[in-house]
Amino acid sequence: MKSEDNKLRFFAPAIVSFVMLMAGLGFDHVFPQEWFQGWIRVIWYAIAYLPVGLPVLKAAWGSILKGGVFSEFFLMGIATIGAFAIGEYPEGVAVMLFYSIGEIFQGMAVRRAKTNIKTLLDQRPDVVTVVEGNLTKDIQASAAKIGDVLQLKPGEKLGLDGELLSEKSSFNTSALTGESKPATKEKGSQVLAGMVNLNKVALVKVTAAFQDSKLSRILELVQNATAQKAPTELFIRKFAKIYTPIVVYLAIGICFIPFLFADNYDFSDWLYRALIFLVVSCPCGLVISIPLGYFGGIGAAGKNGILFKGSNFLDSLAAIDEVVMDKTGTLTEGVFKVQEVHVKPKYEDGKLLHFVNALESKSTHPIATAIKAYVGELDPEVILEQVEEIPGQGLRATAEGKELLVGNFKLMDKYAVSHDIDASSIVYTTVAFAYDGEFVGYLTIADKVKADAQKAIAQLKSMNVGVTMLSGDKSSVVKAVAEKLGIANFFGDLLPEDKVEKFKQIKAVKGKVAFIGDGVNDAPVVAISDVGIAMGGLGSDATIETADVVIQDDNPDKIPVAILIGKKTKQIVWQNIGFAFGIKVLVLILGALGLATMWSAVFADVGVALLAILNAIRIQKMRFG
């Protein structure tokens, strides 16, 4: 009931003004009243004007005090006061009434767009169930502490980020990622606020405070996205500041200059034309409908599990000529499995593999996970010293007083470890190891291409967007993945600095280039790209901070969707600009020639604004992908 009362107060001034305007027009034309003449008529329309006109006049005065004389409020104020001055009372009220109605609908549209985005992303429940011994109790989610154990019943939504304590559980992640397929999590897996438990009671240990969850940070990110303005948006705002004083001076010219040339100069007639000119020229429709278009684009992207850090990136992505992708975790699943193991006979007891497992555990690369899955849990008796990472090559340490090397064959060559293996003949990713200066053997690891990767590449090509793949993986592996996906341009065996150089070369030739990777290891490339896109953003805090666009799941088919949303948003924005300017120019000319009325001016201003708003919010109803 309270909400309805607020809405009524919101619309009340316009309702009062509308009822009095309709009654006044009735007294004037439908059933003329003798008493409705002279000062009574003036006072009647003045009262009808005040509910909708006074707020605008106050805004105009406030703008003048701040140095902004030529605002849309100023235009509406002098146009309607001028209409009263020449006796066009109903038209003066109508202009301000419909302007105010337009402002109300514009404000509602903006609030709705913001609310839609917030509702879309803010999937956190207010209350969570905490387990304390054999008892459970419900508390506010914001009061839960790190280390608390939460009980999550089937159908319940997780309120905070945590670690799954139950052996296995399935979650619906669509609220976060836009992905309808359930995700099965094992014990120890990270689970995130907003995920819905599907099948059985699960226990989750809280690992981040309510305000620090990935979802909270993403919500804050998107709510602040509108601070990053698109070039089109910035241009229109600057244009309006120059445009508004120009039309005021032109209106003055329309009113007085004809006195020098016209034989039968009628001041009221030319003032009326000048007032029409002022009403039509008001840029408010453009100023509001353009940011609303970008709101719509950000909201549409959010529905598809894509987060833009600002409307400027919608424009940038719409103009992309080439997409450069990392391989692992972007086009492949990043889940490696050991395929083959080759070691010298004297090391077949497995002790060396435990050394390798211990050293790889110091790395965050998915290869370490694959080796652990093959070898097993870390041997507590293995003690490593002087652990050192060699960028792009591998790891080095001392085990039982002897040098241990684990990495690619470049690492073997760097430390002059002789071997008779032709690395180029091995297709899979290879991890070689040496101990005490002796080559011991190698193992091969394979990654799996993502199910949607081929579709994503085909869609990018159909959009005339080029694709290049860069990877630190061995060239034979990169070639095999590229051929499977239909990528003609690919480069392997790249160190981080090599990736930067290669990317610069591509950018110099291709024009606007986006880079897609994990947003952490590839940070140097992200920094020089026109748009940096992070895959699997919910899994990495650093990704959320560094990338321009975050794809909330790992699906590469969201890349063409993101570009398509950028293109469609830009298209709608320019449709609004063209439509608004076209109609305004037409009515401006007709008004200056005396062929348009104030009612035409109302349509050209408020009508165009409302149509532009409807066009802007259309993108939120569209289906992509």
Image (spheres, rainbow, N blue to C red):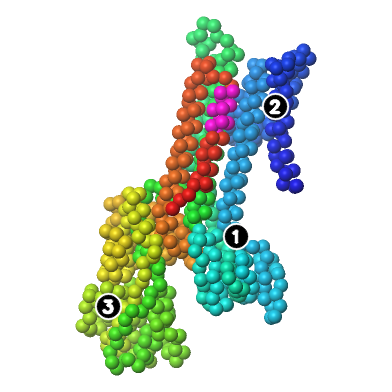
- What label sits on residue 123 in the rendered view? 1
Query: What residue is shown at x 32% (from left), y 91% (from top)?
Result: 348
Q: In terms of image quadrants, where is residue 57?
A: top right
Q: Position of residue 477 (x, y in %)?
A: 29, 70
Residue 496 in the image: state x and y as whole percent: 34, 67
Residue 611: image location, x then y, percent = 54, 35
Q: Nearer the viewer, residue 486 or 443?
A: 486
Which secondary structure lies at badge 1?
loop
What secondary structure is the magenta-colored segment mainly?
Answer: helix
Position of residue 396 in the picture relative to residue 75 (left or right): left
What's the CA distance linking mark 2 and mark 3?
83 Å
Indicate whether 616 appears above or below 118. Answer: above
| Mark identifier at residue 409 | 3
Tell me which residue sits at (67%, 20%) in the image: 89
Label 1 to label 2: alpha-carbon separation: 44 Å
Horizontal arrangement in the rendering, residue 417 relative to residue 220 (left or right):
left
* Mark count: 3
What residue sits right under mark 2 in the picture? 49
Span colored in magenta: 599-609
Observer-nearest of 354 and 165? 165
Res 336 → quadrant: bottom left
Other-residue count near label 2 (Cα within 10 Å), few / some / many at <14 / 14–19 / ≥20 = many
User: The residue under label 2 is which amino acid type?
Assistant: Tyr
- Contact, mark 2 vs mark 3 (Cβ under 8 Å): no
Q: From the viewer's perspective, is 331 left or right of 295?
A: left
Q: CA distance from mark 1 to mark 3?
A: 48 Å
Q: Amino acid at mark 3?
A: Phe
- Tell me which label, 1 or 2, sits earlier in the chain: 2
Q: Secondary structure at mark 3?
A: helix
Residue 141, horizontal then vertical, whole percent = 66, 66
Q: What kind of residue is marked 1?
A: Gln
